[in-house]
Image (cartoon, rainbow, N blue to C red):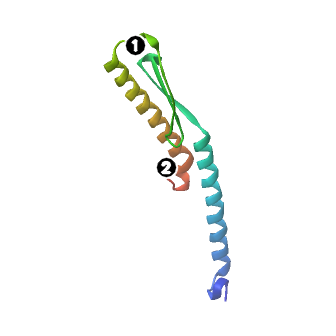
Amino acid sequence: MGFGGFPGGGNMQSLMNQAKKMQEQMQKAQAELEATELVGVSGGGLVKVTLTGKKDLVSVKIDPSVLDDAEMVEDLIAAAWNDANKQVDALSKKLLGPLGGAF
């Protein structure tokens, strides 16, 4: 008999090794994603929003020239955040997608 009393135990060990390797790759990809900061931009650079790969907000930069129009600033912040968020999603898919993970 093989591994654990089942025939073909060598195959089971091979599967376990593959699973362990995939888990290590996933952890490495997640750590890389978490350490990355992505900048979303709107209004031709008037507003910049920086997110981590975990989608935590790091900073918001607003060009002083737009501060007199609150509604426009609000729209630009939302657009910049959406841009950064899409970048995080794309990076997450790139790093974790082949491993079957979703962030």
Mark drawn on residue 66: 1
What's the amino acid at mark 1? Val
Q: What residue appears at the point 35 percent right and 24 percent down from the top-left corner?
A: 74
Viewport quadrant of the N terminus:
bottom right
Please indicate whether residue 8 sits to the left or right of residue 40 in the image.
right
Query: Residue 20: image x %, image y %?
Result: 65, 64
Q: Is residue 79 above or below residue 98?
A: above
Q: Residues within 10 Å of mark 2 (few under 14, many from 20)?
A: some
Where on the picture, by quarter, is residue 38? top right
Please indicate whether residue 62 sits to the left or right of residue 2 in the image.
left
Residue under circle 2?
A: 103
Task: Residue at the far left: name it.
Answer: 71
Q: Disc 1 on helix, strand or loop?
A: helix
Task: Residue at the far top: name it.
Answer: 65
Q: What residue appears at the point 40 percent right and 13 percent down from the top-left corner?
A: 66
Query: Residue 98: image x %, image y %?
Result: 54, 52
Q: What residue appears at the point 47 percent right and 41 percent down from the top-left corner?
A: 89
For the residue pair 83 and 55, the one nearer the viewer reads as 55
Q: Disc 2 on helix, strand or loop?
A: loop
What's the amino acid at mark 2? Phe
For the residue pair 34 and 21, the one nearer the viewer reads as 34
Number of marks in picture: 2
Nearer the camera: disc 2 or disc 1: 1
Q: Is residue 22 above or below residue 45?
A: below
Q: What residue appears at the point 68 percent right and 77 percent down from the top-left corner?
A: 10
Between discs 2 and 1, the one toward the N terminus: 1
